Amino acid sequence: MFLNKLLFALALFFLLERFGKAPSSPTKLIASTSFAIFFIHPIPIMVFIKTKSFPITGQARIDLELASGFIVTVAVIIEVIAKRIFGQRSRYLLGYQGNCTYLYPVISR
């Protein structure tokens, strides 16, 4: 079993090394805002708790994936809105400076 896992990990590493050169825009956005996501993620979690909307499907793995996607999406939206409202001062509130060049057209509208 150990040998299978080791070979699978090596194969996955080589596949990612070969085909994973350019990260996608959502990946760049999450990477650039990860520090602020760390501070904001309790807000969507409190929404889940207050609305008692969890579990969604009744299957733990699907619920976890849906909840994680919801939490990250809401946190990024809050960060982008805060960046639009507070400009450069948003980094004092969230730790997010908005250094993503592909995000500037969204923020400056």
Image (cartoon, rainbow, N blue to C red):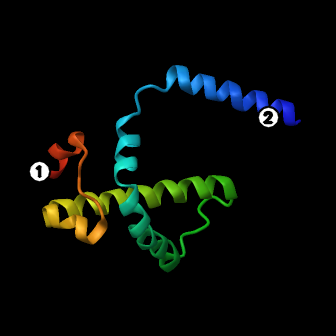
* Residue shown at the point (85%, 31%) measured from the top left: 3
Residue 38 location (% of width, % of height):
43, 64
Q: Are marks 1 and 2 in contact (CB under 8 Å)?
A: no
- Judge whether 91 appears above or below 4 on screen: below
In the rendered image, residue 73, in percent from the top left (x then y), is placed at: 40, 55
Residue annotated with mark 1 = 108
Q: Position of residue 5 (x, y in %)?
A: 79, 34
Which element carries disc 1, helix, strand or loop?
loop
Q: Give the alpha-carbon distance from disc 1 to disc 2, as whole Å.
A: 47 Å
Q: Is residue 33 left or right of residue 12?
A: left
Quarter holding the N terminus is top right
Is label 2 in a helix, a strand or a loop?
helix
Nearer to us in this view, 20 or 75:
20
The mark closer to the camera, 1 or 2, is 2
Disc 2 packing (10 Å; few <14; some 14–19; many ≥20): few
Look at label 1 and name its amino acid: Ser
Seen as rendered, the residue at the extreme left is: 109
Q: Which residue is mark 2?
A: 5
Q: Residue furthest right?
A: 1
Residue at the spot 52% in from the left edge and 77% down from the top edge: 49
Which residue type does callout 2 highlight? Answer: Lys
Question: Residue 98 has which mark?
Answer: none
